[in-house]
């Protein structure tokens, strides 16, 4: 298309006027509108009930992870919020509980047992087999040495007072019952839990 | 229209016409912040950042419980702590959760020049639509509560969405759900006002005679309301405006100057049109050409004597 300089300036002017009118509010208001509300991110996430472990209140939490647990999908926790059906907190959480997601994914989080040998200066990562075997070995040795079957008057007491145990705070009644059973069955009397067993 | 099925717009920035709304029976929602029950634990702040995937940079301790010290593009809600010595000489620690008030008549939306960058849904929530935001900062000037903040990374404006993504699927906002003392409640605006009245009666019976609801009529009421022990002096609560108002500049610019400007443009266009048909363009006549050639000749002969 042939265009003289005068025509070019005319067209430019018309274009400027049209775009100015559009910006001043004469634009088509019925234009297609992009999706506005951010899509809800938990629609098909897997919801898992659990208990917050970070104090003795033991609030109920809902853990949301991506994927539907299909064979080829690897779950990853994407959101944590309070469990409205839990009688302790009824959906609420404290600031620490509200920020649990970052505790779960903290780069400094302990992921394997660590061991510092007697007299050693450094912790090194060890396998669960090593850790559990060693704990069991030491417990057995200590129990064999210090177990008190009968007291001074000859009554059977079956006490093991030289070793104690601290259990986690996130205990339901059932886990508390199991903790009690396991520990008491060995005669251990010194044990406690942040939430009281 | 697919995105309008659940959330009709009632207002849209920089648009003279609001899209027609077929469904008109949506309840107005509101968040009620009862500052008298708040213990300042900041669970709401954590929950907000967790849900909205916001992680501001870790700063430094500034000698205050406020952390961080101001709202930001990644800090949509912030606990503000004020120490107030009352008439009896007792210290009162007034803690207020700051954030978008979701005004019924939003100053940000009024000031915004980008079509559809700020919208108000039928349930009352005022939302920023980031892909339409041009980062001009007019919303910051238009806001009576100094809430929006422009991100230095993408140059777009951000603020609390009242968790529009949660509310649109029938959930309460994240801060409301987290609050362990029940200081933040969520429901229909009517229910929240009723609940506030119960709280106010209770507070008055406990000696807070000036207790009341903060739902400022100057901005048409808000969808985030406060129960205050000193409702006569909102400014005690870290500068909550006593009488919030949209800046006079914004009101004038978007109020009467805009139609005047439109009139001016229309008048110029009309004047041009009538000039064209009555007088028409300047034509070069034969006489003009001869005269022009003569002037040119004379000037050239003067230059080369």
Image (cartoon, coloured by chain):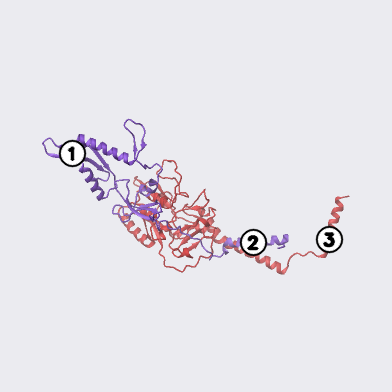
Question: From mark 3 to mark 2, how far is it between C-alphas?
Answer: 37 Å
Q: Chain of mark 3?
A: B
* Front: mark 1 or 2: 1
Q: Residue drawn 26% across and 36% down?
A: A138
Q: Is residue B52 left or right of residue A155?
A: right
Of residue B111 and residue B144, the one placed in the foreground of this image is B111
Q: Chain of mark 2?
A: A
Characterize the local packing of mark 3: few (<14), some (14-19) or many (20 or more) Cα atoms within 10 angstroms.
Answer: few
Of residue B157 and residue A138, the one placed in the foreground of this image is A138
Disc 3: which residue: B291
Disc 1: which residue: A159
Between discs 1 and 2, the one toward the N terminus:
2
Whole-percent x, y for residue B229 in the image: 36, 52
Colour used to depict chain A in the structure image: purple
Disc 2: which residue: A15
- Residue A28, by quadrant, is bottom right
- Find numbered disc 2 in the image and state the secondary structure of the residue it sits on: helix
């Amino acid at each position: 298309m042939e265009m003289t300089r005068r025509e070019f300036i005319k067209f430019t002017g018309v274009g400027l006027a049209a775009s100015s009118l559009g910006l001043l509010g004469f634009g088509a208001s019925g234009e297609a509108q992009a999706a506005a509300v951010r899509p809800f991110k938990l629609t098909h996430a897997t919801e898992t009930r659990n208990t917050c472990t970070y104090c003795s209140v033991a609030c109920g939490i809902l853990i949301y992870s991506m994927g539907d647990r299909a064979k080829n999908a690897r779950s990853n926790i994407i959101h944590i919020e309070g469990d409205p059906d839990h009688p302790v907190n009824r959906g609420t959480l404290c600031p620490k509980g509200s920020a649990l997601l970052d505790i779960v994914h903290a780069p400094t989080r302990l992921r394997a047992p660590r061991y510092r040998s007697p007299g050693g200066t450094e912790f090194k990562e060890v396998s669960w087999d090593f850790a559990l075997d060693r704990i069991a070995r030491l417990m057995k040795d200590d129990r064999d040495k210090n177990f008190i079957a009968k007291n001074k008057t000859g009554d059977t007491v079956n006490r093991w007072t030289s070793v104690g145990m601290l259990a986690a705070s996130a205990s339901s009644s059932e886990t508390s019952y199991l903790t009690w059973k396991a520990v008491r069955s060995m005669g251990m009397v010194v044990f406690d839990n942040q939430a009281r067993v | 229209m697919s995105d309008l099925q659940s959330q009709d717009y009632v207002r849209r920035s920089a648009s003279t016409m609001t899209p027609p709304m077929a469904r008109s029976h949506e309840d107005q929602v509101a968040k009620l912040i009862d500052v008298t029950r708040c213990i300042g634990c900041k669970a709401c702040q954590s929950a907000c950042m967790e849900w909205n995937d916001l992680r501001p940079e870790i700063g430094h301790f500034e000698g205050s419980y406020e952390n961080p010290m101001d709202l930001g593009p990644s800090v949509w809600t912030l606990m503000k702590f004020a120490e107030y010595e009352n008439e009896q000489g007792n210290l009162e620690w007034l803690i207020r959760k700051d954030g978008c008030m979701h005004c019924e008549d939003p100053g940000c939306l009024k000031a915004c020049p980008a079509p559809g960058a700020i919208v108000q849904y039928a349930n009352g929530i005022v939302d920023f639509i980031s892909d339409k935001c041009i980062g001009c900062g007019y919303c910051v000037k238009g806001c009576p509560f100094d809430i929006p903040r422009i991100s230095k990374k993408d140059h777009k404006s951000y603020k609390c969405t009242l968790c529009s993504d949660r509310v649109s699927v029938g959930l309460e906002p994240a801060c409301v759900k987290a609050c362990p003392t029940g200081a933040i409640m969520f429901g229909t605006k009517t229910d929240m006002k009723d609940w506030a009245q119960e709280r106010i009666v209770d507070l008055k019976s406990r000696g807070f005679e000036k207790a009341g609801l903060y739902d400022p009529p100057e901005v048409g009421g808000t969808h985030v309301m406060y129960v205050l022990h000193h409702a006569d002096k909102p400014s005690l609560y870290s500068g909550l405006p006593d009488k919030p108002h949209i800046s006079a500049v914004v009101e004038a610019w978007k109020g009467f100057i805009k139609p005047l400007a439109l009139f001016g443009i229309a008048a110029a266009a009309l004047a041009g049109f009538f000039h064209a048909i009555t007088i028409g363009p300047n034509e070069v006549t034969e006489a003009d050409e001869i005269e022009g050639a003569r002037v040119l000749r004379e000037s050239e002969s003067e230059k080369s004597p």
